[in-house]
Image (cartoon, grey):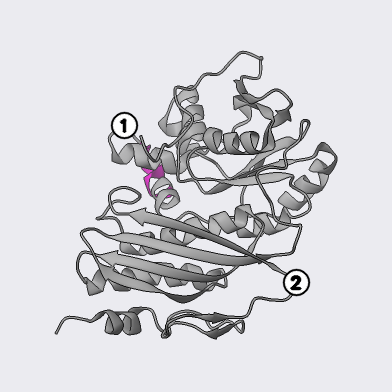
């Protein structure tokens, strides 16, 4: 007998999440009842992933479950918010119990690790797999990291090694060849990004602006510049290129991948010059790299330069959802 919507929810989602004390009523009713802590603002984000648009339909279901939540937690990290709750809307062309079991394994493993409880959602039948997750978290008033706070003289940093996920994606489309010893590493970066939550929390009171890198470093930094009404000079020689990137692509091609490849879910942020020493001391304890790559300037626009001052050009800045 095929599973009904409610038996599917009971089997795969009810009772599989952690139980937070601020959840008065979770999955199983018309609404969740939640108790936000006093004196905190609620940060809310939502992302939709569509099969063969945002992930390959035949990809590892456990990785899909992980990534579906991770991309939302990355948004919370970019705001300096502490994750708490999530809801899930899941559209499936058919009920594949093995796929669902693996999907839930990836989703709930990350949720448990990051202290998130799934508190509600919806399941429905449709022509293709569509996953929409809404994530919510807390941030003290006035301490949220935003895109509109960068000032001339601020230093630009990025976490991790941007470009690795883009390299895996390019390889999947036959546009690049990954050195054999790094194939598993870059595939993991694409399928299981690690949201930089601890870094986002540490940046409260330190960073002047922040964004997560989902559509390409150059393009996402451009959102900070636009919202802040400033420009930037980024030195491409400073980009933190991974061994996988440098072993697989020529140097300038690797730099372009680091600037334009999507799906990294690293943090790009700006720090006033008087706080850079504090930031770099904090970053020593981080489980990822933190690299100074440029400086905010008053003149609008993003200027990419080499260490010798010559211009570095790009044909595109990053991923465009509509073309």
Nearer to the camera, 2 or 259: 2
Q: Position of residue 81 (x, y in %)?
A: 65, 61
Crowd around label 1: few <14 · some 14–19 · many ≥20 (10 Å): few
Q: Position of residue 221 (x, y in %)?
A: 59, 36
Residue 22 showing in the rendered view: yes
> Which of the 4 image quarters holds residue 200?
bottom right
What residue does disc 1 label?
175
Residue lying at 41% horizontally and 69% vertically, measured from the top left: 88
What residue does disc 2 label?
39
Does 56 sit above or below residue 175?
A: below
Q: Does residue 167 appear to the left or right of 214 in the view shown? A: left
Nearer to the camera, 237 or 220: 220
Residue lying at 72% horizontally and 31% vertically, measured from the top left: 296
Q: Nearer the viewer, mark 1 or mark 2?
A: 2
Q: Quadrant of the C terminus?
A: top left
Question: Which comes before the other along the chain, label 1 or label 2?
Answer: 2
Q: Position of residue 266 (x, y in %)?
A: 56, 47
State which region is magenta: 178-185
């Amino acid at each position: 007998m095929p599973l009904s919507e409610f038996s599917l929810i009971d089997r795969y989602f009810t009772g599989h999440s952690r139980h937070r004390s601020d959840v008065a009523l979770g999955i199983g009713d018309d609404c969740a009842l939640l108790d936000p802590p006093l004196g905190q603002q609620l940060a809310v984000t939502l992302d939709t992933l569509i099969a063969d648009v945002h992930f390959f339909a035949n990809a590892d279901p456990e990785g899909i479950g992980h990534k579906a939540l991770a991309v939302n937690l990355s948004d919370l990290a970019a705001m300096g918010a502490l994750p708490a709750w999530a809801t899930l809307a899941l559209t499936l062309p058919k009920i594949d119990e093995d796929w669902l079991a693996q999907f839930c394994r990836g989703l709930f493993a990350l949720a448990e690790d990051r202290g998130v409880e799934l508190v509600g959602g919806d399941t429905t039948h449709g022509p293709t797999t569509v996953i929409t997750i809404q994530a919510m978290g807390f941030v003290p008033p006035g301490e949220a990291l935003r895109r509109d706070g960068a000032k001339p003289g601020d230093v630009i940093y990025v976490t991790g090694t941007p470009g690795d996920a883009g390299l895996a994606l390019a390889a999947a489309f036959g546009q690049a060849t990954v050195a054999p010893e790094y194939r598993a590493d870059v595939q993991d970066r694409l399928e299981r990004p690690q949201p930089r939550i601890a870094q986002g929390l540490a940046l409260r009171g330190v960073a002047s602006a922040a964004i997560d890198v989902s559509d390409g470093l150059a393009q996402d930094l451009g959102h900070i510049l636009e919202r802040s009404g400033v420009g930037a000079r980024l030195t491409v020689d400073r980009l933190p290129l991974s061994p996988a990137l440098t072993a697989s692509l020529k140097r300038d091609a690797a730099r372009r991948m680091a600037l334009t490849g999507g799906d990294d879910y690293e943090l790009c942020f700006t720090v006033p010059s008087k706080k850079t020493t504090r930031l770099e001391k904090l970053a020593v304890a981080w489980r990822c790299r933190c690299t100074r790559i440029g400086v905010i300037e008053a003149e609008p626009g993003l200027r990419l330069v080499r260490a010798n001052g010559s211009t570095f050009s790009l044909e595109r800045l990053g991923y465009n959802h509509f073309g």
